[in-house]
Image (cartoon, rainbow, N blue to C red):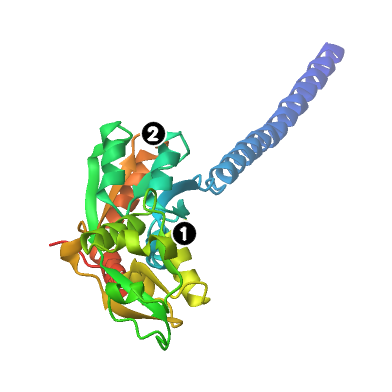
């Protein structure tokens, strides 16, 4: 009997130790589980704290008349500061050449022309969005000579004198300023007389360069181009009655791959901020 009692006591003691051991281990397991949850939570928090990827930069191609170069280059940083995800890429040239590029499928998002006829040609072919075109600016045609005007040129008629050897104009078929100059000289009845003296340039900026360097005695450019150079002077403002009004239409290219961004720049060009820059360079804004 005593022996059985001892066995029972020993069995009870062993069972008690086993239960105490299990209770002691439970907090550890709970701790481990808690630790695991904390680790998972920390990992999740770490993942959510990672910085978002920057928005993709969009390059917007703007085909613009060469006479807009200085004004647009000044407007570039102002626009890009307002729209940091858009980068402007300018393609400057004669409006006729730019028109042909767009007709041939060259990439472009906006077209800024120095003549209505070039814009209209693209509108007629549905290559410009008719709902997103507007006349932005106007300009004047002037006659320039090198600083000092040693030839004493004061009018178109003075160009017919023997002392004047070279007169520069833009290629009339592709450079609006050249077309306006030819029209004005024809209206005065002296274009054919001057034709042997005329040298044609690929754009209005090249006309300016010819006169600046002395490779031409005189040239026809826009007022806005003439006032950018200290090496030439305006000797005569061409009578606006003698040529078609100079206007600068802007339009969004129908095939643009970035129509929303193009619309942003199109709208920006009409802002008071942009217009003040254009006026600074001698352009006028239509009422």
Q: Is residue 175 visible?
A: yes
Residue 267 in the image: state x and y as whole percent: 27, 52
Circle 1 is placed at which residue position? 201
Q: Give the quadrant of residue 67.
A: bottom left
- Discs 2, 1 touching: Cβ within 8 Å: no
Q: Please identify, in this view, whether the residue under mark 2 or under mark 1 is nearer the observer.
A: 1
Residue 47 sits in which quadrant? top right
Q: Is residue 8 left or right of residue 183?
A: right
Residue lying at 52% horizontally and 46% vertically, measured from the top left: 52
Q: Please name the residue that numbered disc 2 is placed on.
A: 255
The quarter of the image holding the N terminus is top right
The percent coordinates of residue 6 (x first, y second) are 84, 18
> Disc 2 and disc 1: Cα gap in Å?
30 Å
Residue at the image position 34 percent from the left and 81 percent from the top: 153
The tag earlier along the polypeptide, 2 or 1, is 1
The answer to whether 157 appears left or right of 38 in the picture is left
Label 1 Cα crowd, 10 Å radius (few <14 / some 14-19 / many 20+): many
- Residue 76 can be seen in this image: no
> Label 2: how many residues lie within 10 Å, few (<14), some (14-19) or many (20+)?
some
State which quadrant residue 287 falls in. bottom left
Helix, strand or loop at label 2? It is loop
Residue 241 horizontal side relative to residue 111, left or right:
left
On screen, residue 216 above or below 200: below
Q: Nearer the viewer, residue 212 or 101?
A: 212
Q: Nearer the viewer, residue 70 or 230?
A: 230
């Amino acid at each position: 009997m005593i022996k059985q009692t001892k066995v029972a006591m020993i069995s009870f003691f062993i069972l008690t130790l086993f239960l105490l051991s299990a209770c002691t281990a439970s907090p550890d397991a709970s701790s481990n589980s808690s630790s695991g949850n904390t680790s998972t939570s920390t990992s999740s928090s770490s993942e959510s704290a990672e910085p978002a990827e920057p928005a993709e930069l969009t390059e917007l191609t703007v085909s613009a008349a060469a006479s807009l170069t200085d004004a647009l280059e000044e407007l570039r940083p102002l626009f890009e500061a307002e729209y940091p995800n858009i980068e402007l890429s300018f393609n400057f040239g004669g409006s006729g050449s730019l028109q042909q590029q767009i007709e041939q499928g060259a990439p472009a998002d906006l077209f800024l022309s120095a003549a209505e006829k070039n814009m209209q040609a693209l509108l007629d072919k549905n290559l410009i969005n008719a709902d997103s075109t507007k006349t932005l600016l106007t300009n004047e045609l002037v006659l320039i000579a090198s600083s000092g005007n040693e030839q004493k040129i004061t009018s178109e008629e003075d160009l017919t004198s023997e002392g004047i050897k070279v007169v520069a104009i833009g290629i009339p078929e592709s450079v609006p300023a050249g077309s306006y100059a030819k029209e004005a000289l024809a209206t005065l009845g002296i274009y054919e007389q001057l034709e042997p003296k005329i040298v044609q340039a690929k754009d209005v900026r090249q006309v300016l360069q010819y006169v600046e360097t002395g490779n031409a005695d005189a040239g026809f450019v826009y007022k806005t181009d003439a006032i950018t150079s200290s090496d030439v002077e305006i000797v005569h403002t061409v009578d606006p009655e003698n040529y078609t009004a100079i206007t600068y239409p802007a339009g969004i290219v129908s095939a643009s791959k970035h129509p929303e961004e193009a619309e942003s720049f199109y709208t920006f060009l009409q802002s008071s901020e942009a217009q003040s820059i254009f006026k600074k360079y001698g352009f006028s804004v239509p009422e």
